[in-house]
Image (cartoon, rainbow, N blue to C red):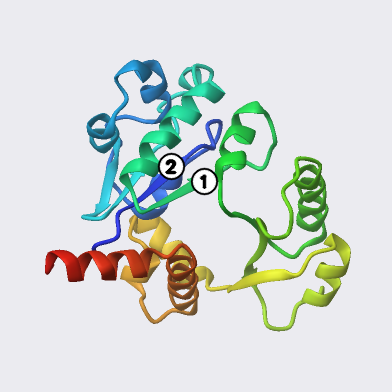
């Protein structure tokens, strides 16, 4: 999918560090920086603000320091998403585990919400509360999906127990591969590049392929290639 343009926007403004998981580069700008210069926001400014992980994949960091976070308003998020959606094939948002006017602006616009959780009881309780918030906002099971991270093959709490507790089916499990994932984070290299045969890498690639197919990106790119000969 080298011709698919992807941007990851970190909207976890109080504790976001998405860029550290995929790169060891320093961000030139951030969501906070763009909010302070929102009148100039266009594709050029957004591109210049990204950490370039791959030629077709960039990350927009959350904020450089805490005071920047307070400058970001819901309308800034709306404008940022407008520009991102117009210029990228796939826009991925990393969100905090909270619901407020700013996050609601992004969640309302999202085609799909993946609630990533683990299996211990405190995580289940947290997920159940968040799902209740989502339901009250009108986000149904067609939009919200449960992804269980660090899943063990023989857990104390089964997937069936989890689904009964939260009232939803699990969409996907991501296996536990602590050593390779930790190495990926520490080196700032995506695990699919560092350890392409790791079970986590295979799962992420499968999820990405499904998303591409679901969004019709593969078909659009195939049609465009035939039209342009590229």
Earlier sequence position, callout 1 versus callout 2: 2
Splitting the image into 4 quarters, where does residue 15 fall? Answer: top right
Neighbourhood count class around disc 1 (C-alpha, 10 Å): few under 14, some 14–19, many 20 upward: some
Compared to 2, does 200 lie above or below?
A: below
Question: Where residue 209 sits in the image (x, y, percent)?
Answer: 43, 72
Q: Which residue, given by chain and number where applicable, does mark 1 sit on?
A: 94
Quadrant in which the N terminus is drawn: bottom left
Residue 221 appears left or right of 78: left
Q: Is residue 7 positioned above or below 162 on the image?
A: above
Q: Residue at x 29, y 43 (%)?
A: 51
Tell me the crowding category of disc 2: few under 14, some 14 to 19, or many 20 or more residues within 10 angstroms, Cα based: many
Residue 25 placement (x, y as % from top left): 27, 44
Locate residue 197: give its quadrant.
Answer: bottom left
The secondary element bearing badge 1 is classed as: strand
Foreground residue among 53 and 20: 53
x and y, in percent, of residue 200 in the image: 49, 73
Left or right of 70 in this view: 26: left
Secondary structure under tag 2 reads: strand
Question: Is 29 placed above or below 226 here?
Answer: above
- Position of 75 with respect to 123 (left or right) is left
Q: Are marks 1 and 2 in contact (CB under 8 Å)?
A: yes
Residue bearing the label numbered 2: 9
Residue 60 visible? The answer is no
Q: What is the x, y in percent for residue 228?
A: 14, 64
**Image-based side of 91 in relation to 49, left or right:** right
């Amino acid at each position: 999918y080298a011709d698919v343009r992807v941007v990851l926007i970190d909207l976890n403004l109080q504790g976001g560090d998405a860029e550290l998981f995929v790169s060891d580069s320093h961000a030139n700008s951030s969501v906070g920086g763009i909010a302070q210069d929102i009148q100039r926001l266009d594709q050029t400014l957004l591109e210049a603000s990204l950490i370039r992980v791959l030629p077709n994949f960039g990350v927009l960091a959350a904020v450089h320091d805490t005071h920047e976070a307070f400058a970001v308003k819901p309308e800034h998020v709306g404008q940022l998403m407008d520009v991102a959606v117009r210029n990228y094939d796939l826009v991925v948002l990393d969100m905090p585990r909270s619901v407020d006017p700013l996050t609601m602006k992004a969640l309302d616009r999202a085609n799909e919400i993946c609630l990533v959780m683990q299996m211990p009881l405190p995580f289940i309780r947290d997920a159940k509360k968040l799902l209740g918030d989502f339901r009250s906002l009108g986000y149904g099971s067609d939009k919200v999906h449960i992804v269980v991270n660090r899943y063990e093959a023989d857990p104390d709490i089964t997937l069936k127990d989890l689904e009964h507790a939260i009232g939803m089916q699990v969409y996907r499990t991501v296996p536990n591969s602590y050593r390779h994932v930790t190495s990926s984070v520490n080196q700032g290299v995506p695990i699919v590049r560092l350890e392409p045969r790791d079970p986590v890498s295979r799962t992420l690639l499968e999820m990405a392929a499904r998303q591409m197919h679901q969004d019709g990106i593969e078909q659009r790119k195939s049609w465009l290639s035939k039209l342009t000969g590229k």
